[in-house]
Image: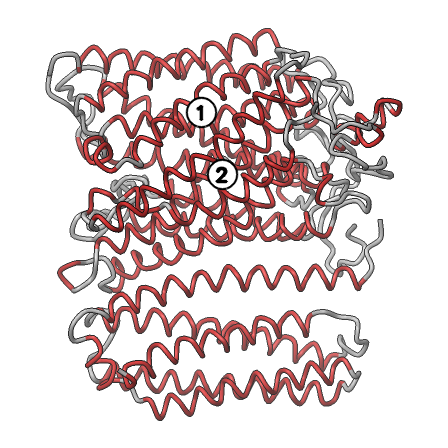
Amino acid sequence: MSEETDLNVPEPTQSIPGLGVSNNQGLLQWISSVDHKQIGIMYLWLSLLFLVIGGIEIMLVRTQLAVPNNDFLGPEAYNQLFTMHGTTMIFFVLTPAIFGFATYFVPLMIGANDMAFPRLNALSFWMTFFGGFLLYFSFLAGGAPDAGWFNYAPLNQYNYSSSPGINYYCSGLLLSGIGTVTASVNFIVTILKYRVNDMGLKQMPLFVWMILINSFLVLAAFPSLNAALVMVLLDRQLHAHFFNAVGGGSAILWQHLFWLFGHPEVYILILPIFGIFSEIFPVFSRKPIFGYGFVVGSGIAIALLAFGVWVHHMFATGLGNTVNNFFAASSLLIGVPTGVKIFNWLATMWGGSIKFSVAMLFGIAFLVEFTIGGLSGVSFAIVPIDWQLTDTYYVVAHLHYVFIGGSLFGLLSGLFYWFPKMSGRVLDERSGRWFFWLFVVGFNTTFLVQHALGAMGMARRVYTYPDLPGWGILNFISTAGGFLMAIAVGLLIYILVRAVRSGSKAENDPWDANTLEWTTTSPPNLKNFEQVIPVKSTRPFRDYKRPDDADWNRKEEYGK
Amino acid sequence: MRIGTERKNMENKLMIKLVVGTEAMFFLSLIMVFVYFSLAPGFVRLQTSELDLRSTGMFSLVLFSSSFTYWRAEKNYHKGNIGMLKLWLIVTFLLGAIFLFGQGKEYIRLFNDHVNLGANTFGTSFFTLTGFHGLHVLVGLIIIAIVTALAVAGDYDEKKSSVISTVGIYWHFVDIVWAVVFFIVYVIPHIR
């Protein structure tokens, strides 16, 4: 693959050492690597590291909120912690985890030996890495950003936040944002040009499809964020007047630019998850995906509609009825293709012989939690309800049901599904079940009650609250749930470390799966494939294992 | 799996097209902000009084003609005419540099009139939009300088490389962005 490079890049010569650093070059081999599998694993470790950091931040916040009129944290510390929690979880946990799985598995699933541009791939990772650390350097430099993850004007202006935190927010996200864009360019070229010869677009695994659609979404959405971040930096450092109303600028402008990125961003964080589940449901239901074309088509529909709904974050800004009604209608509309997918997965499970592995348990839990998050999301499309509930804990509950019950459940499901392939070790299913139940119960304990708190009018982002009837007990339940989730994450890390150290060896194809990545060894060799099996349907490996029952050889439409 | 040069070239071109696409979205944001600010009272008066349509128009023609010279460079490269390739590359570089010189001259004049990034929304959006375009021209010039140096060193003596075409896609893109920016920033206030 790299015989045409002129530069002498230090590349590993032996097979990839699973997840460890015990090889002849130690850490240097990881740092200098341009191999997509190692870069993918580094993305995932980075994500886990920031999950712990972002988790500690929010546990401090939840401790502060455990009882009314608490003074465990002051307002300044509180603002920094919830801002860093949101920013970290979105940009440095969910995004790198998704890109980690994509970097690792897209080439494997399409029968390629690496990404189209391996060095660009490494650059993308290190941009994300240093972006994250630049953001966190703000704690040492005199204060973290404190204007919320969406950094509204005028709070992002110098006279409202004079600590350097927001400068670090801008430069950190700018750096990682460029990394995200370059990674997406790489994915598109890889998917369009590196598929094994007989894999047409209609035989492509759905995860790969979703990454393809997602990458276009990134290319269209991130420039808007990058431009807005540059403008805030210019405002703060060179006294420009973009968002400073006194100087003729416009605070609403920031909201438009940010949400024109921000709403597609939430789909950027969920489309790949739809892809992961479209791999997992068929494997653990022993059936092909129901309605392959609809999964792809609704993904494209979501990507297009994603750019027409951003004002539903701004109903309370007073843009007028015409604008509000247009965006209310488009926001209701985007629920449709998402609903289509839920039915795709339900129908895939229907009549299947379901195997309740941890990966599948997360899939089933996802169907429930994500539907709750989807329904509370649709309620925001109704303008009067939005006016009543905006900026309350109802929003907090909604976004956590889609980000955790949606995105994170998908990533955990993918972790339990793909971990044997990546490490050559099996994650213990028994303790995995413990983790699953602890996490799901903790998650619902934390966030279900927040719907009620929001409906009762508790405002988000305020460091404490008065002792109104019911508020104290509901907040205490929420905090208790939060600690349950923290224990669950601790257990997950224990499961991971134990599996890496002394887990039982994984087979090459432990789940009797369908796609090409399972035809390689666990973990795959440095060179993924010497030869790739023929691809004639969406389940090439199953066709290969059961030639007399192959999908492409069947008379009736499959998925029957 | 050995990748033919032909195929690698296709990939490089696809990549630069995607990069150009995402860059276009970036400029779209900056242009929208400029247009949004221009709706406020007093903005158009500043636009007509502070900007010199004629002088910048001349420098714009210089930039547009660099697209033509680059196209000649590319044609000659595909014909295997390496001498002419080098010549047209150098001409392209000079034309781009003249454009940047013009932009610098205009900036200095505006600074002397106390129009700068912090002066008002006109200064803010004007310098950000044209500044980012100028930055892209500068990056293009650096790339063209490297390509020229490589051409002199003999790297393009065989006509297999996609570098000339990929850089070309970027360079033409920078010109097209300027056509839009020039029309919106300099021409439109004189029309209405």
User: Is residue B79 shown left or right of residue A215?
Assistant: right
- The subunit carrying tag 2 is A
Seen from this angle, which residue lies furthest front? A556
Residue A189, percent from left and from top: 66, 53
Is B44 drawn above or below residue A13 in the view shown?
below
Of callouts 2 and 1, the N-terminal one: 2
Q: Position of residue A151 (x, y in %)?
A: 28, 45
* Residue linked to disc 1: A370
Residue type of the residue flagged with mark 2? Thr
Asked if badge 2 and badge 1 are on a common chain, one would say: yes
**Outermost residue toward the right?**
A548
- Is A5 situated left or right of A137 in this image? right
Picture coordinates of residue A487 (x, y %)?
42, 13
Which residue shows up at 68% across the image and 28% down it?
A422
Residue on which the image places disc 2: A95
Is residue B101 placed above or below A428 in the rendered structure?
below
Tag 2 and tag 1, C-beta contact below 8 Å: no
Residue A448: percent from left, percent from top: 32, 17
Give me the chain letter of mark 1. Answer: A
Q: Which residue is located at x 61 percent, y 29 percent?
A: A278
**Quadrant containing the C terminus of chain A in the rendered view:** top right
Camera-nearest label, 2 or 1: 1
Is residue A174 shown left or right of residue A106? left
Q: Secondary structure at mark 2?
A: helix
Q: Nearer the viewer, residue A86 or A275?
A: A275
